[in-house]
Image (tube, rainbow, N blue to C red):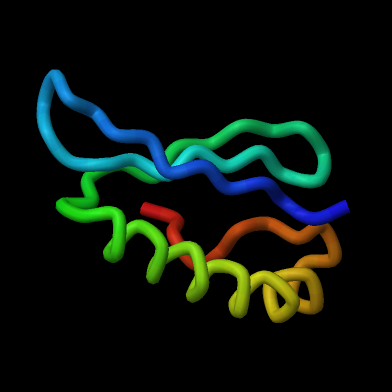
Amino acid sequence: MAATYVVIHRAERGGFDVEIVGHDGVRQTKPGFETTEEAEAWIVCDIRAEPYADIQNGRGFRMSWRF
């Protein structure tokens, strides 16, 4: 099962967040996008990076946006 991504509008502070539910049920949020296009572009990059992360650590950890 793949991760699920949802773009959320944050009217109270402006901008958009991406909420992610991983294949293991772990929930994460990537905040701070100015537009939906930026959020959607990040999702595409994250999806493309995920198979490489699976190979690196065997668990599918989302290396593309660790802070």
As drawn, is 28 to the left or to the right of 36? right
Residue that lies at the very extreme toward the top in this rendered image:
12
Front residue of 35/54: it is 35
Name the residue: 41% across, 62% down: 40
Residue 60 pos. (x, y %): 76, 60
Residue 53 pos. (x, y %): 69, 72
Residue 46 pos. (x, y %): 53, 68
Residue 25 pos. (x, y %): 77, 32
| The quarter of the displayed image where residue 38 is located | bottom left
Residue that lies at the very extreme toward the left in this rendered image:
13
Q: Quick check: 48 above or below 29?
A: below
Name the residue: 15% across, 52% down: 34
As drawn, is 7 to the left or to the right of 38? right
As drawn, is 1 to the left or to the right of 64? right
How many numbered marks, from 0 up? 0
Name the residue: 61% across, 32% down: 27
Front residue of 48/12: it is 12
Q: Quick check: 50 above or below 5?
A: below
Q: Quick check: 38 above or below 1?
A: below
Name the residue: 56% across, 64% down: 63
| The quarter of the displayed image where residue 65 is located | bottom left
